[in-house]
Image (cartoon, grey):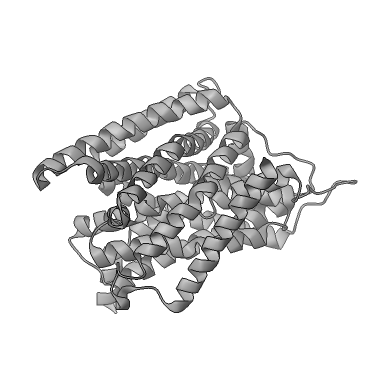
C-alpha cells in the first residue's frame, strides 16, 4: 500500500496541472454564465462535452508514457503537414486564449486587492510576474504551485455547492423569461461554452509535455496504468467542478434579475460574491484569494504550455543539430516565446478594451472550431501502427472517440452554417 502511494506521489503532477488549467475560464466564467443565463438547460451539454472530448486528452498522456516522446513528436510521425498544421493552429489561437485567461485573471487580482486605478496595467504587471517566474523556475515552480491552488479551489467549490443546495435557488423575479438557447446568440454561447469544456482540445499536447517533464523531474517512469489513473483523477475533478459551477450559477443568479457584468473586475467580484452568499461574508477574503490563485495558476500554465509546445514544434520542424545544441535552442526558444506570447496577448486585450464576455467567447469559439483536427491526429497516433496493441485504447474508448469526432465536426459545421 505504501509503495503504491509512493508511486502515485511520484506520478502526480500532469493531471493536476491539466485540472488547474481547465478549471480557470471554462469553469469560473463560462460554467457560471451557463447557469446564470440559462439555468439547468445546458448541464447536459456540459457533461456531454466532458465525456466526448475525454479520449483526445487521455491519448496525449498515453502516447507520452508509451513512446517517451510528446504527442507533438507524434504529429511529425504522421507527416510534416500535420506538424505544420498544428503549428499554425497554435499560433492562430494562442494570443486570443492567453489574452482571455490573462484578462480574467487580472479581474480577480483587482477584486482581491481592490485595485481600481491600474486598468490595463494590471494585466501588464501580471504578465511580467508570469514571465519572471517561468524564466527562473519553469516546471518545478509550476508543479508545486498548482497542487496547493487546486486543493484550495476544490474544497471551497464543493463547500459552496453543498451550501447552495441546502439554501435552495434564488427566488425568480416577476415576469422573468429565460434566455433562448436556439437563437443565434444562444448558439454562439453554447459553442463557446463547449469550446473550453473542460478545455481546448489543442492543448492536449501540453499534457504529454508535462508528463515527460514530470518523469524528468522525479527520475521515475510510471507504468501506463499509473499515468492514466493520475490523468483520469484530474479529469474527473474538472468534470465534477464544471457541474458544480453551473448549479451555483443557476441557484444564485438565474431568475434573480441580476446580470453578470462585462467588466473583468466586476465579473470577478460577482463570482466571488456567488461563494460568499452561500458560505457567509466571513469567507470573502478566502474565496477571493482562492479564485485569484486558481486563475493565476491557469495563466502561468498557459504561458508554460504554449511556450513549451511551440519550442518543441519549431525544433522538430527546423532543428537538425546534435542533442546538446538542441537543448540550448529549446531553452532559448522557451523564454522568447513567453515574451512573444505576452506582447501579442496584450495587443489583443487592447483591441477588445473592457469587453470580457466577447473576448472569452471569441477565444473559446476558435478553440472549438479547430478541435476536430487535433482530435483526429491524437486518435490516429494511439491506434493502428503507431502503438503496440497492448498499449492501445480499449474498443469502448475507440467507439467514444468516433462519437467525439462526429460531435466536434457536427457542431463546428452547425455553428458555421448558423453563424454565416
Snapshot quadrant of residue 12:
bottom left
Asked whether 234 or 118 is in front, the reply is 234
| Image point (30%, 71%), residue name | 224
**Is 313 left, or right, of 155 in this rendering?**
left
**Is 98 left, or right, of 279 in this rendering?**
left
Q: Position of residue 295 (x, y in %)?
A: 47, 43
Asked whether the viewer can see residue 31, the reply is no
- From what the image shows, is residue 219 above or below residue 120? below
Q: Position of residue 160 (x, y in %)?
A: 61, 55
Residue at far right of view: 175
**Is 385 left, or right, of 117 in this rendering?**
left
Asked whether 419 or 9 is in front, the reply is 419
Asked whether the viewer can see residue 128, the reply is yes
Quarter of the image with the N terminus in it = bottom left
Asked whether 206 or 291 is in front, the reply is 206
- From what the image shows, is residue 158 above or below residue 34? below
Q: Position of residue 16 (x, y in %)?
A: 39, 57
Amino acid at each position: 500500500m505504501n509503495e503504491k502511494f509512493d508511486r502515485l506521489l511520484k506520478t502526480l503532477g500532469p493531471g493536476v496541472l491539466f485540472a488547474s488549467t481547465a478549471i480557470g475560464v471554462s469553469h469560473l466564467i463560462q460554467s457560471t454564465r451557463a447557469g446564470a443565463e440559462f439555468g439547468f438547460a445546458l448541464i447536459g451539454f456540459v457533461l456531454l462535452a466532458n465525456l466526448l472530448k475525454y479520449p483526445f486528452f487521455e491519448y496525449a498522456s498515453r502516447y507520452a508514457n508509451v513512446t517517451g516522446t510528446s504527442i507533438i513528436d507524434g504529429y511529425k510521425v504522421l507527416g510534416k503537414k500535420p506538424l505544420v498544421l498544428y503549428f499554425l493552429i497554435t499560433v492562430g489561437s494562442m494570443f486570443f486564449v492567453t489574452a482571455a485567461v490573462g484578462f480574467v485573471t487580472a479581474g480577480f487580482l483587482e477584486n482581491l486587492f481592490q485595485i481600481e486605478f491600474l486598468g490595463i496595467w494590471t494585466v501588464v504587471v501580471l504578465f511580467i510576474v508570469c514571465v519572471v517566474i517561468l524564466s527562473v523556475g519553469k516546471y518545478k515552480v509550476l508543479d508545486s504551485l498548482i497542487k496547493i491552488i487546486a486543493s484550495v479551489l476544490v474544497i471551497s467549490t464543493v463547500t459552496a455547492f453543498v451550501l447552495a443546495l441546502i439554501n435552495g435557488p434564488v427566488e425568480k423575479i416577476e415576469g422573468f423569461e429565460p434566455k433562448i438557447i436556439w437563437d443565434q446568440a444562444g448558439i454562439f454561447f453554447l459553442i463557446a461554452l463547449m469550446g473550453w469544456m473542460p478545455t481546448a482540445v489543442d492543448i492536449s499536447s501540453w499534457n504529454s509535455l508535462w508528463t515527460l517533464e514530470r518523469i524528468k523531474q522525479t527520475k521515475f517512469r510510471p507504468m501506463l496504468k499509473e499515468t492514466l489513473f493520475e490523468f483520469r483523477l484530474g479529469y474527473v475533478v474538472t468534470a465534477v467542478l464544471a457541474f458544480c459551477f453551473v448549479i451555483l450559477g443557476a441557484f444564485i443568479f438565474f431568475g434573480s434579475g441580476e446580470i453578470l457584468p462585462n467588466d473583468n473586475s466586476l465579473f470577478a467580484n460577482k463570482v466571488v460574491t456567488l461563494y460568499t452568499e452561500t458560505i457567509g461574508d466571513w469567507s470573502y477574503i478566502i474565496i477571493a484569494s482562492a479564485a485569484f490563485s486558481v486563475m493565476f495558476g491557469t495563466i502561468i500554465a498557459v504561458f508554460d504550455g504554449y511556450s513549451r509546445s511551440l519550442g518543441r514544434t519549431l525544433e522538430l520542424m527546423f532543428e537538425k543539430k546534435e542533442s546538446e545544441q538542441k537543448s540550448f535552442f529549446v531553452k532559448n526558444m522557451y523564454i522568447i516565446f513567453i515574451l512573444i506570447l505576452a506582447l501579442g496577448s496584450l495587443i489583443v486585450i487592447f483591441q477588445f478594451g473592457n469587453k470580457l464576455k466577447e473576448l472569452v467567447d471569441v477565444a473559446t469559439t476558435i478553440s472549438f472550431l479547430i478541435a476536430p483536427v487535433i482530435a483526429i491526429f491524437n486518435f490516429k497516433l494511439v491506434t493502428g501502427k503507431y502503438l503496440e496493441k497492448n498499449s492501445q485504447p480499449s474498443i469502448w474508448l475507440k467507439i467514444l472517440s468516433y462519437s467525439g469526432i462526429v460531435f466536434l465536426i457536427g457542431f463546428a459545421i452547425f455553428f458555421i452554417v448558423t453563424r454565416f
